[in-house]
Amino acid sequence: MGAVQTAKRCSTFSFAQARALVGDLQKPNALIYWVDFLCSIIGGHLAFHAMYFLPRWMPESPYLWPALAMSYATCVILYMRAVMFIHELVHLPKEGFKAFRIAWNALCGIFLLVPSFLYYPHVDHHRRKHYGTEHDGEYLSLSHHGPWMIIGFILQALIIPFLGVARFL
């Protein structure tokens, strides 16, 4: 197939057709959410506790620091995965997921200082009126700024966690 034919086919392919192709994948499966979240948060909690107990279990072992590093990395990755469910909570239908919302907030959101109500303004980001415009609170047009803006954007990730704690003081 030539480039012209491909371009023609792409230009006639609509969002409605795309939605129809993946429509069966759009319905959230509660079992998948529960298993994924519980494995992530429980695994994160276990890794967190391992960092506390490893020095007591193997104080003189040459493997202590590698074990602590592995526990730390595991904890960060699994907690981050569990926290990312906050995005799904905003987009999930209200009916059928109430228990999941409560469990997520109890086991993760409140514990890690990111209760789900903090993320509900994210819905405005998806409104057609705002998406990708200067009114979109989640859109930052880095391509229209210099390289220092990009570097600053990346470096802010080092500061934001400390500011997050301050919002509850």
Image (cartoon, rainbow, N blue to C red):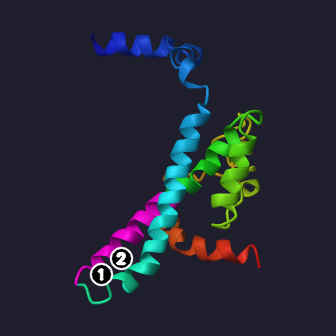
Report which quarter residue 26 is drawn in: top right
Residue 83: x percent and y percent?
Answer: 58, 56
Residue 121 is situated, as x and y percent measured from the top left of the image, at 75, 50
Which quadrant does the C terminus fall into?
bottom right
74 within the magenta span? yes
Of residues 53 and 128, the one drawn nearer to the viewer in this rendering = 53
Residue displayed at 72% across by 54% down = 116
Q: Amino acid at mark 2?
A: Leu
Residue occupying image coordinates x 66% and y 71%:
164
Residue found 67% across the figure and 75% down from its top = 165
Residue 151 lies left or right of residue 27; in this view the side is: left
Q: Which residues are magenta?
A: 62-79
Amino acid type assigned to the residue bearing label 1 in the image:
Leu
Q: Residue at x 38, y 85 (%)?
A: 55
* 45, above or below 9, in the image: below
Gap between marks 1 and 2, in whole Å?
6 Å
The reply to whether the C-beta atoms of the residues labelled 1 and 2 are less than 8 Å apart is yes
Disc sitting over residue 64 in the figure: 1
Residue 57: x %, y % from top left: 36, 82
Q: Residue furthest left?
A: 62
The N terminus lies in quadrant: top left
Q: Secondary structure at mark 1?
A: helix
Q: Is 29 contained in the magenta span?
A: no
Residue 157 point in image, percent of width and height: 52, 68
- Give the residue pinned by disc 2: 68
- Mark 2 crowd level (few <14, some 14–19, many ≥20, 10 Å Cα): some
Majority secondary structure in the magenta region: helix
Q: Is residue 44 above or below residue 86?
A: below
The residue lying toward the viewer, choosing from 75 and 150, is 75
Examine the rendered structure and indicate whether residue 7 appears above or below residue 145.
above
Residue at far front of view: 57
For the question of whether residue 101 can be seen, the reply is yes
